[in-house]
Structures are given as structure tokens and as C-alpha cells.
Amino acid sequence: MENTTMKKCAREILNKLSHRRTPVSSAMVLLDSGFCRNDDLTLDQRFSGSIRSILLATALLLLANGCAKEDVPPAAAPVAAEPIPVAPPPVNPEALTLLEFKIAKNQAGKPLLKGSISNASPQTIKLATATFTLFNKKGVKIGTSIATVDNLEPGFAWNFEAQILQEGVTSAKFDGFTAK
């Protein structure tokens, strides 16, 4: 029912605006009107005097508003802030614990240091090194050996084997850790 009322109102409005009272089927008239016909109502491009006045006033206001503006340079595009790199907290080498170590021989009969180290810190240690001083049977220092590991997770132990390149090594002393 509401749809029927809307159609009646539309027809009345269109009949008041249009100079035609009946639909025209001529293709030339349809092209002339500027509108496509899709029902029994035909529109014309003519506007009543009040609509023409409203459109003219709106156009003048828009033009006047545009001309009154000062030339303002466009705002600079916002620059995304670069994230500030935050250095991880320094790793405390004291969080590393030497659980055991000994001098052993590999399958080829060459000497090496074998042992295990644990990470008691709450963070992953990117690079851990353990340094050992090597001695001969007379107790004379004859070299050093270094064991390294990457990415030692918190709470994990690392079993290492470090090569001994010097001949005659009979003992070793643990010197300390470095950690990054």
C-alpha cells in the first residue's frame, strides 16, 4: 500500500515538471530527453524556476567558498616513526655454570676437552664461550682452548668438545666465560 502511494506521488510530481502528459515511444524524443524510459513515466530535462534558482545559488556559494580560501600548502605526509632499536639487556656470564670437564681422546686418538655448561639466566645467550688454559705434565702453560656455542636457551645445558691442537697436554684449567 505504501508503494502504491509513493508511485502516485511520483507521477504527480513528474506530471507537474514535465511538458508531456503521456509517454512517448519515439526513439528521437527519448534521446532528446536525456533520460531512459523504464516505466510508463517520462522525464524531461526542464526544471521549474524554483529548482533552477536553488541550483544556481548552490553553485555560486560553492564558487565563492572556494575562491575565499587562502592558498595553504598541503600538509606534509606524516612520517612513520622508526622504531628505536632496544638493545637486549646485557648477558651476565655468571649465569653460565661449568658442570664438568675433562681431557679425552676423539676417535682419531687426538686430545680434546669434553664437558657441559648450563644457562641459568632467564634469556637466550646468543654466543657463549668457555676458555681453558692447557698445561703439560710439568705444569707449564702450553696453550689455550676455547669452546663456543650459539643460542644457548635458558635452563638448557650444552655438551661441548673443544679441540686441543698442542702436543703433550696433560691438564687444563677453566679460565672463564664470555657471553653475548
Image: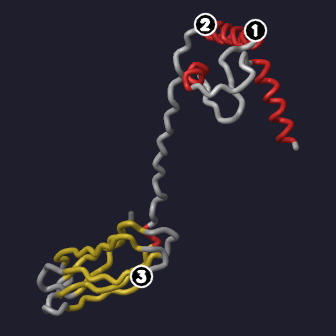
- Proximity of marks 1 and 3: CB atoms separated by less than 8 Å: no
Q: How far across and how far down the image is residue 94, in percent?
A: 45, 70
The disc at residue 157 is 3
- Going by the numbered disc 3, the residue's amino acid type is Ala
Q: Is residue 100 above or below residue 84?
A: below
User: Of the residues tagged 1 and 3, which is closer to the observer?
Assistant: 1
Which residue is nearer to you in this view: 45 or 80? 45
Which badge, 1 or 3, comes first in the chain's sequence? Answer: 1
> Quadrant location of the N terminus?
top right
Which badge, 3 or 2, comes first in the chain's sequence? Answer: 2
Q: How far across and how far down the image is residue 15, in percent?
A: 78, 22
The disc at residue 49 is 1
Give the secondary structure at mark 3.
strand
- Proximity of marks 3 and 2: CB atoms separated by less than 8 Å: no
- Residue 4 sits in quarter: top right
Q: Is residue 149 above or below residue 8?
A: below
- Going by the numbered disc 1, the residue's amino acid type is Gly
Q: Is residue 77 above or below residue 146?
A: above
Q: Is residue 53 above or below residue 31?
A: above
In the figure, is residue 43 to the left or right of 7?
A: left
Calculate the distance from the C-alpha at mark 1 to the C-alpha at mark 3: 92 Å
Residue designated by label 2: 67
Which residue is nearer to you in this view: 72 or 134? 72
Label 3 neighbourhood size at 10 Å, few (<14), some (14-19), many (20+)? some
Which residue is nearer to you in this view: 2 or 102? 2
- Going by the numbered disc 2, the residue's amino acid type is Cys
User: Of the residues tagged 3 and 2, which is closer to the observer?
Assistant: 2
Q: Residue at x 41, y 85 (%)?
A: 99
